[in-house]
Image (spheres, rainbow, N blue to C red):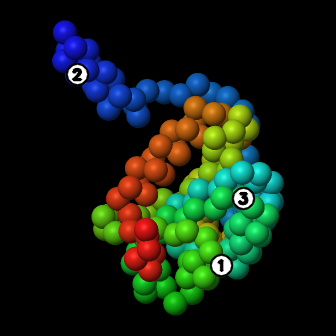
Amino acid sequence: MRRLLAALLLCLTVGAGATPLPAAGSIEVLFTPWDDAEGAIVRALGEAKKSIHVQAYLLSSRSIAKALEDAHARGVAVEVLADSEMVAKGDKSLVPRLVAGGIPVWLETRYAIAHNKVLLIDALGAHGVVITGSYNFTWSAQARNAENLLILRDNPALVRRYLENWRRHREDAERMNGAQ
């Protein structure tokens, strides 16, 4: 009987990602180059109180890197997952600068491309924020590309799902510079 219940629980857990989440909170929608998506990201990072979790394919925006550094300096726990290849070959990547500033970074090496573009702000709080979309954290995403960005606030179930995914990716990633 215990095995049957454990198997049933496993099946329900594995399929949990397909379960619709309740609609809650607010949604801010931005489209570049017309809307100031970079400014909205910087403002949201400036409001972080406890934590910021980043998943970045490419991070070369000086404004966003500075906002992460400023949050870290304020005592906000900042952690970054980055695509290994883009850090290695991207001469404009600011990820090494974040590491030099004491921000923990893990490199995703398991996938052909770690193409996520996600910021989680205060993910364990009641008023967590998910920022996601096609928007890369680059100057070009704001000034030259046609990109989209969603800022989703006050939906704890959604933020938890994104945080679970972030943690799953970190488990498979390698700490930058080999540190654990």
Q: Mark 3 highlights which residue? A: 76
Q: Secondary structure at mark 3?
A: loop
Mark closest to the chain's N terminus, 3 or 2: 2
Residue at position x 44%, y 80% in the image:
177
Q: Residues within 10 Å of mark 2 (few under 14, many from 20)?
A: few
Q: Quadrant of the C terminus?
A: bottom left
Task: Between label 2 and label 1, give the one nearer the viewer.
Answer: 1
Q: Quadrant of the N terminus?
A: top left
Q: Position of residue 85 (x, y in %)?
A: 39, 78
Q: Position of residue 176 (x, y in %)?
A: 45, 75
Residue at position x 67%, y 53% in the image:
51
**Of the residues shown, which amino acid type is indicated by label 3?**
Val
Q: Position of residue 125 (x, y in %)?
A: 69, 39
Mark closest to the chain's N terminus, 2 or 1: 2
Horizontal side of residue 180 vs 144, given as left or right: left
Q: Mark 2 highlights which residue? A: 7
Q: Residue 6 sits in which quadrant? A: top left
Q: Residue 137 sits in which quadrant? A: bottom right
